[in-house]
Amino acid sequence: MSASFVLLGLLSSGPKHGYELKRAYDRSLPNAKPLAFGQVYATIGRLERDGLVERAGQDRDGGPDRVAYALTDLGRQSLDEWLGAVEPPAPYVSSVLLAKVVVALLTADSDRAGTYLADQRAAHTARLRELTRSKHESTANIGDVITADFAIAHLDADLRWLRTTLERVGEMHQETSP
């Protein structure tokens, strides 16, 4: 995910300082990897250097100086282009989950792979239940619900793959066992 464009999108509603951007990012993408404060300020610095945001004021409000940033016309145009571009499907499959199973199989340890797959399936199922419950909480907003739906769809795909892979590992184990 491009933090730059998320920050541009957050600035589209009006000027914000770094702390507000961080809070808005974490609130808008609750199941995404949290954005560190340092990353917010480094990204804003690059966006400012590239003319996509500009300083829009400064306040102290009882603490250190806080600089607010606003979207420039070029920033709005860049955001509009990004939002209008179709995201191509990922050309490569990479995940720690896949790597662990492949490595376990490469070590000729189908029992380890089977155990790992079963344990991972249990962890995925627990997370799926947790996300499903979160969608029905009274505090859930539309962003929370669609983020949970996205995560649930991916977990569901992983669970289908885990089930199929467990079956294949079991078949392989039967073929190689005396």
Image (tube, grey):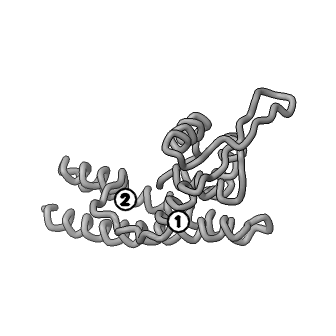
- Residue 11, given in percent of the width and then of the height, sits at 65, 54
**Amino acid type of the residue tagged 2 in the rendering:** Leu
In-front residue for pair 9/150: 9
Question: Where in the figure is residue 2, as x and y percent of width and height?
Answer: 48, 53
**Which label sits on residue 134?**
none
Furthest residue to the right?
62
Is residue 48 visible in this depiction of the protein? Answer: yes
Residue at coordinates 81% horizontally, 31% vertically from top-left?
A: 60
Residue at image location 47% in from the left, 55% down from the top? 1
Question: Where does residue 111 sit, x and y in percent of width and height?
Answer: 28, 54
Circle 2 — which element?
helix
Instruction: Give the left or right position of residue 30, taking residue 150 as reference.
Output: right
Residue 33, how many percent across, how many down?
Answer: 54, 49
Q: Are marks 2 and 1 in contact (CB under 8 Å)?
A: no
Q: Is residue 76 left or right of residue 136?
A: left
Judged by depth in the image, the label closer to the viewer, 2 or 1, is 1
The amino acid at mark 1 is Asp
Residue beneath disc 1: 80
Disc nearer the start of the sequence (2/1): 1
Query: Residue 112: in sight, yes or no?
Result: no
**SS at circle 1:** helix
Which residue: 37% across, 59% down?
117
The local crowd at label 2, few if under 14, some if 14 to 19, many if 20 or more residues have their Cα within 10 Å, is many
Q: Foreground: 48 or 17? A: 48
Q: Is residue 63 left or right of residue 9?
A: right
Disc 1 residue crowd, few under 14, some 14–19, many 20+, Cα 10 Å: some
Residue farthest along the front direction in this orientation: 73
Q: Which mark is residue 117?
A: 2
Q: Name the residue: 25% across, 54% down.
A: 102
Q: CA distance from mark 2 to mark 1?
A: 42 Å
Q: Is residue 166 left or right of residue 128?
A: left
For the C terminus, the quadrant is bottom left
